[in-house]
Image: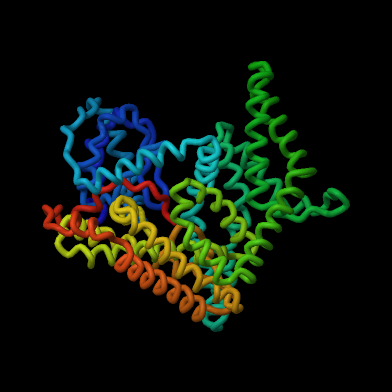
Amino acid sequence: MSTDKNRATAAAILPLVGGPDNISSIAHCMTRLRIALHDRSLVDDAALRALPAVLGVVEDDTYQIVLGPGTVARVTPEFEALVEQGRSAGHPPRTAATAVTAEELADRGAALKQAQKARNSTPVKLFLRRIANVFVPLIPALIGCGIIAGLNGLLLNTGWLPAAVPALAAIASGFMSLIAVFVGYNTAKEFGGTPVLGGAVAAIIVFPGVAKIDVFGQHLSPGQGGVLGALAAAFLAVRVEKLCRRRVPESVDALVTPTLTVLVSGLVTIFGLMFLAGEVSTAIGSFATWLLATGGAFAGLVLGGLFLPLVMLGLHQALIPIHTTLIEQTGHTALLPVLAMAGAGQVGAALAVYCRLPRNRSLRTTIRSALPAGFLGVGEPLIYGVSLPLGRPFVTACAGGAAGGAFVGLCNQLGFAFGATAIGPSGWALFPLLDGPSGLGPNLAIYAGGLLAGYLVGFAATYFFGFTRQMLTELNADQEPIPATAPPVNEPVVAKI
């Protein structure tokens, strides 16, 4: 039955994006089906947003359909199969649908989305987006191994099933011990090189034999430089490979290019990048620990309050390798629980909008359909469907995030340090991934307290300061309700925390 449902969702989406012949590539991340299109004009945005399974749509470097965690991993294979079937059958692309008039609030969201897309097209932000593309495919493995690591820690602390502890430790740690190889592979793939060559150069970093090599008077350590070193090594390998492809004769290219790519990049990695990246990684870990240990509530307030605007600027993608580096060093990232409070502020703000506009049936239906995903950390529908188009509620949502972040930061300063063993989930979905020296109980209690603070402050700030009298007059009127099964009407562009 579940397979039939996923196939039905894929079948409903396909004609609305122009049919099989309009699609050049298909991929997915934690929450989104990502499609590269030949002709954007053939997409029916309004009809897509009206599908029960669709939480929203995003237009970026690819066309992205938000389906939510879990669902997207099941729908994507069905969608790929239908595309292949359609191409083999020679189905023509779908013609553009008749335009559908959207509500005023949806128009505001669309305009904001277009403006944000223009702002996010700078070279720096495009580069950060490509760096994010290196790490996004790794998130499912990080989540799975992170949860297993948490379960193993629980068994170790309680003394239950001692025979299972070594096996679970191996399962949880195996991926992390080789994550540099995966980062190298994805880096080369993203920047136009041969993926396996990027992985081969990055594998040098985790090879135990590097411990015998002396650099700058010190012996290297296996894993030194971590994911940052792997990223730099694979990027260098791509540059060397492209240079070789231009200069090496075709008759010997298959032998010479891979050899020179691995040799030159490998030597630079061993005698330079591993040391430099190791120093940077150590500095990042030390700074993050110092920031929360000394900055406490203030650091948490700033991080939690500014994360949504940071996402709007497209700069949040720079945090992905930082999170991964912290997980690699300490087993968890202490920054993610603080940043996740931004989503709590957003949920609180949406609940306040729901209460303040009792006669706006359309907007209230949008909020009801988006709240479950919001509680689980998928904030796009609420942000671009509700708070940002309204203006003030977006600011008050940030206030809620600041309050939650301040609470978590204060507890960290008091000695209750903890973090998340994986990146990707937030909201309630982050509970299984919490880890820290204080123990499971305090970690869960502090994170829950932060969420509660974010909900309450986001609600109160929005309820009392989120509307002017004119806004209430304009918005608090009877509206035509959208179907009860319909998702938010706006086009989200905010990446999942």
User: In this rendering, is residue 46 above or below 402?
Assistant: above
Q: Nearer the viewer, residue 73 or 62?
A: 62
On-image quarter of the C terminus: bottom left
Would you identify the image quadrant in which residue 427 lies? Answer: bottom left
Quadrant containing the N terminus in the rendered view: bottom left
> Residue 11, located in which quarter of the rendered image?
top left
**Residue 442: x %, y % from top left:** 51, 80
> What residue is drawn where x is 47% and y is 46%?
313
Residue nearer the viewer, 24 or 345: 345
Along the horizontal axis of the image, is 496 left or right of 269? Answer: left
In the image, residue 285 above or below residue 272: below
Q: Position of residue 10 (x, y in %)?
A: 26, 44
Residue 387 image point, x, y percent: 32, 56
Residue 214 in the image, given as x and y percentages of width and height: 85, 50
Q: Residue at x 31, y 34 (%)?
A: 84
Residue at the location (35% across, 42% down)? Answer: 113
Above or below for 327 versus 37: below
In the image, taking residue 388 as reference, residue 324 lies left or right, namely right
Q: In the image shown, does 445 or 327 lie closer to the viewer?
A: 445
Looking at the picture, the colour scheme in use is: rainbow
The vertical placement of 347 against 39, above or below, is below
